[in-house]
């Protein structure tokens, strides 16, 4: 793990009624880039909204997407936006699903944040970009991005870097979680290892416990 990671952009958005093709829905997926300092609370950036309860909360306060994956999507999405491609709050450089672990703790400006779970891709991304199988592609590649809880509130800005403070001792990567979430779903050994990560979000832990207990 590097000693710091650059923030390419900091993004937040308001709930809108959007229509893409035949779909109309409420969403805050169209994030605006901000150069101004923003207060980060336990439930997210000031001014950022989520349309549905499953998209927010203390375990899902902040969404990060690696800028490294943009090149892949540029070959799939027509006229992709250059920032907040998937409605993420932080577009970062260097921190990916492979080197971010459940429970890893970072300083971000005045705040302290902790990795909690992978981002769960939803149908709105397919609707927005008119790529029907985009969710499948995200699952297959593992390019999902991931979420944080906020351990300490504070002011953050795009000029702040993500500075690792503590690496979780179990070293369960986001990539490993995605593997049992989307591919090897009933591998008891893999599930047991993922469940060892104490900082895994409660909602995802319940899902994995059901998978682990299934015959």
Image (tube, rainbow, N blue to C red):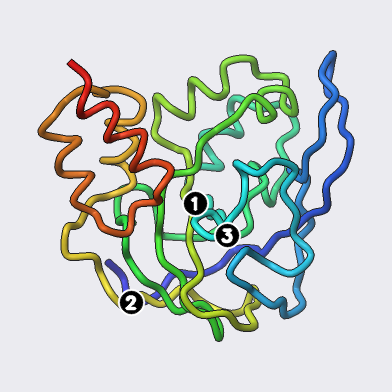
Identified at 76% across, 52% down, the residue is: 31
- The spot of residue 211 in percent (x, y) is 27, 26
Q: Is residue 141 left or right of residue 183?
A: right
| First of labels 1, 2 by sequence position | 2
* Quadrant of the rendered image containing residue 34: bottom right
Residue picked out by circle 2:
3
Check disc 1 and report its element: helix, strand or loop: strand
Q: Is residue 26 above or below residue 32?
A: above
User: Mark 3 Cα within 10 Å, few/some/many (few <14, many 20+)?
Assistant: many
> Quick one: 143 or 72, which is closer to the camera?
143
Tell me the number on the disc at residue 112.
Answer: none
- The quadrant of the rendering that contains the C terminus is top left
User: Mark 2 Cα within 10 Å, few/some/many (few <14, many 20+)?
Assistant: few
Q: Is residue 194 left or right of residue 20?
A: left
Residue picked out by circle 3:
61
Give the number of the mark in front: 3 or 2: 3
C-alpha distance separating marks 3 and 1: 17 Å
Residue picked out by circle 1:
66
Contact (CB < 8 A) between labels 1 and 2? no
Give the number of the mark in front: 3 or 1: 3
Q: Is residue 125 left or right of residue 93?
A: right
Identified at 75% across, 28% down, the residue is: 128
> Quick one: 125 or 83, which is closer to the camera?
125
- The quadrant of the rendering that contains the N terminus is bottom left
Contact (CB < 8 A) between labels 3 and 1? no
| First of labels 3, 1 by sequence position | 3
- The spot of residue 127 in percent (x, y) is 73, 23
- The spot of residue 144 in percent (x, y) is 47, 39
């Amino acid at each position: 793990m590097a000693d710091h990671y650059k923030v390419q952009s900091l993004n937040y958005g308001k709930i809108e009624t959007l229509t893409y093709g035949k779909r109309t829905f409420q969403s805050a997926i169209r994030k605006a880039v901000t150069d101004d300092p923003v207060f980060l609370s336990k439930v997210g950036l000031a001014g950022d909204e989520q349309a549905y309860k499953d998209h927010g909360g203390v375990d899902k306060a902040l969404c990060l997407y690696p800028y490294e994956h943009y090149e892949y999507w540029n070959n799939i999405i027509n006229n992709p936006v250059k920032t907040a491609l998937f409605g993420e709050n932080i577009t970062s450089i260097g921190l990916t699903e492979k080197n971010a672990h459940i429970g890893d703790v970072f300083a971000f400006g005045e705040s302290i944040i902790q990795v909690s779970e992978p981002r769960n891709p939803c149908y709105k991304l397919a609707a927005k970009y008119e790529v029907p199988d985009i969710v499948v592609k995200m699952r297959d590649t593992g390019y999902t991005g991931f979420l944080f809880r906020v351990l300490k509130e504070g002011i953050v800005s795009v000029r702040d870097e993500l500075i690792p403070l503590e690496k979780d001792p179990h070293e369960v990567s986001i990539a490993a979680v995605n593997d049992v979430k989307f591919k090897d779903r009933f591998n008891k050994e893999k599930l047991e290892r993922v469940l060892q990560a104490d900082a895994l979000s409660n909602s995802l832990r319940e899902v994995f416990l059901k998978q682990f207990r299934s015959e």
